[in-house]
Amino acid sequence: MFGYRVPAPDEAMLISGGRRGLGGAPFRVVTGHGKFVLPVFRKTRFLSLAMSEAEVVEKCVTRQGIALTVRAVIAFKVGNDNESIVNAGQRFLSDQEQMSVLTGRIFAGHLRSIIGSMTVEEIVTERQKLATEVLDTSKAEMAKIGLHVDSLQIQSIDDGQTGYIEAMSQPHKAAIRRQAQIAQAQATQASAEAEQAAARKQAEFARQTAVVQAEYSAEVDRAKAQADQAGPLALANAQQEVLAAQTELALKQAELREKQLIAEIVKPAQADAERIRVLATAEAERMKIQAEAAASYDRVALDRMLIDQLPQIVKEASAGLAGANVNVLNGADGLGEIAAGLVGQGLTILDSVRKNLNGDEANGAAGAAIERYLGTARPDDDGPVDIR
């Protein structure tokens, strides 16, 4: 639309020619929105609110009298508030490039002032402290002209040909070199130890590999030997198992045959033997009883026979004496003694026969005894028998 103006996001629109702005400013400030401006009656200008940069290269003298060349960069912009925009617009609206020039000069002065109160060691080792002090001292002055400093960076500090900073850095460099040498030595030692460890590991790995290979070869050889012996060994094992089975079968057959023999032969034989023994015992007992009975009967018969024959024996003895030449010295007593002697001899013969008889030979023994007696009892005809 004709007469309607809109500032850019990083611009402030300044409208002059009408009523004054806030605080008695010669123009009104418009930011962030558009405004209808009457042509001819109003005049519109734009002030940049974008970030600007100023570079400072200043030779400064320290508290020690040593000249240093300091290079710094300042980042600044116009403040966002109306007061800063009005202050900056009144100073730089016609030539906004002057903001960088003026800012560099302001900071150069503050750098000289602050560096003059510090030593080289402080400046070199405490750059952030230097930047902070410069910002603090320049803040109020920059605000008066409507500028706001965002940052200050000290880029370099150079002592020219004096060599002070170099000399100052020598102990540190020496320490750094020592540390570097120590670190290098440690690194070398660590590398050597690592190489030695690696060599040991390689040797151990080679040894283990050799052991594994040897074990593998031995296992292969054993497997091959077992494979070669598998046929004969299996046959031998099979034959051994067959022999063992046959032996066990033979033992079982022998045990079965033994049981059969016991059942078929031994037991019947034992039964027959027991039967024969019982029969023999019974027969022997019967024969013993019969023998005892026969012996008892024979003794009774013999006794009866001897008793029956005793008178005959005495008679025969007396008849034998009848023809004998016997001298009786004591008359009737002598004859009685002879008769008594004959009877006594007969009884003695009877008792001897009883003692010497045995079983079935009783009759024969008795007869023989009688015959012996009769043969010896007869007196010899050639001589007298003297009976006292």
Image: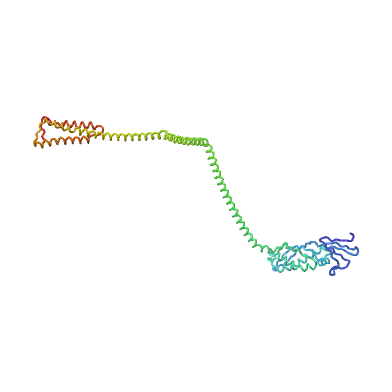
Q: Quadrant of the N terminus?
A: bottom right
Looking at the image, residue 80 sits to the left or right of residue 297; the answer is right
The residue under the point 78% across, 67% down is: 143
Looking at the image, residue 271 sits to the left or right of residue 356; the answer is right
In this orientation, which residue lies closer to the viewer: 99 or 19?
Answer: 19
Q: Quadrant of the C terminus?
A: top left
Q: Count the numbered circles shown.
A: 0
**Residue furthest right as drawn:** 40
In this orientation, which residue lies closer to the viewer: 323 or 190?
Answer: 323
- 170 lies above or below 348: below
Residue 312, image x, y percentages? 17, 31
The answer to which image quadrant residue 316 occupies is top left
The residue under the point 17% across, 33% down is: 311
- 238 lies above or below 34: above
The answer to which image quadrant residue 171 occupies is bottom right
Residue 319, image x, y percentages? 14, 30
Residue 386, image x, y percentages? 10, 34
Residue 347, image x, y percentages? 18, 36
In this orientation, which residue lies closer to the viewer: 47 or 296?
Answer: 296
In this orientation, which residue lies closer to the viewer: 251 or 264?
Answer: 264
- The colouring scheme, among rainbow, by chain, secondary structure or one colour, is rainbow
The answer to which image quadrant residue 173 occupies is bottom right
